[in-house]
Amino acid sequence: MLRTMRERAGFSQSELARRTGLPRTVINAYEHGSREPRSEVVSLIADACGQTIVVQDKPRIDLERNGHILMQVLDLADALPFRPSPELKFPPLATS
């Protein structure tokens, strides 16, 4: 998406870097997917390219994957043998 915005604006990576104040290597990393820009950076790049973009940050939680992992953990916990814990011994309370 960032490369498309930059190319539509007719900018090289160097020109976009100059307009945004970001290093050219960072812009290159964003375009190649080796780094992921924060929403503020996406808005900065869009603004420099003369475009408006609305970014809504959402938590990156894969509920299906997390549910699957939770089920695996619970299955493992069920498979553990039950051993009652020994009686807890607390130090005596100091009385004043």
Image: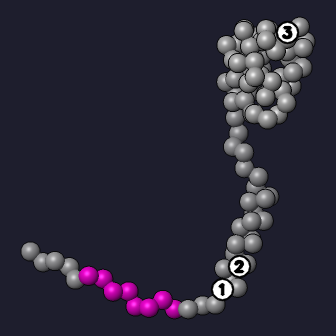
Looking at the image, can residue 52 be seen? no
Q: Position of residue 40 (x, y in %)?
A: 67, 24
Would you place residue 96 above or below residue 78 in this image? above
Q: Position of residue 5 (x, y in %)?
A: 86, 17
Which mark lies nearer to you, 2 or 3?
Answer: 3
The residue located at (78%, 65%) in the rendering is 68
Q: Position of residue 35 (x, y in %)?
A: 75, 33
SS class of the residue under badge 1?
loop
Q: What is the magenta range?
A: 84-91
Say whether marks 2 and 3 touch (CB < 8 Å): no
Between the residue at mark 1 and the residue at mark 3, the CA separation in whole angstroms equals: 61 Å
Looking at the image, can residue 63 be seen? yes
Please name the amino acid that badge 2 sits on. Answer: Leu
Magenta run includes residue 87: yes
The residue located at (26%, 82%) in the rendering is 91
Main SS of the magenta part reads loop
How many neighbours does mark 3 have within 10 angstroms: few (below 14), some (14-19), or many (20 or more)? some
How many neighbours does mark 1 have within 10 angstroms: few (below 14), some (14-19), or many (20 or more)? few
Task: Check disc 2 and report the residue beneath it.
Answer: 76
Task: Check disc 1 and report the residue beneath it.
Answer: 80
Quarter holding the N terminus?
top right
The quadrant in which residue 32 appears is top right
Which mark lies nearer to you, 1 or 3?
Answer: 3
Would you place residue 10 above or below residue 31 in this image? above
Q: Position of residue 60 (x, y in %)?
A: 72, 45
Tell me the tag on residue 9.
none
SS class of the residue under badge 2?
helix
SS class of the residue under badge 3?
loop
**Horizontal placement of 88 versus 80: left or right?**
left
Magenta run includes residue 65: no
Please name the amino acid that badge 3 sits on. Answer: Phe
Task: Check disc 3 and report the residue beneath it.
Answer: 11
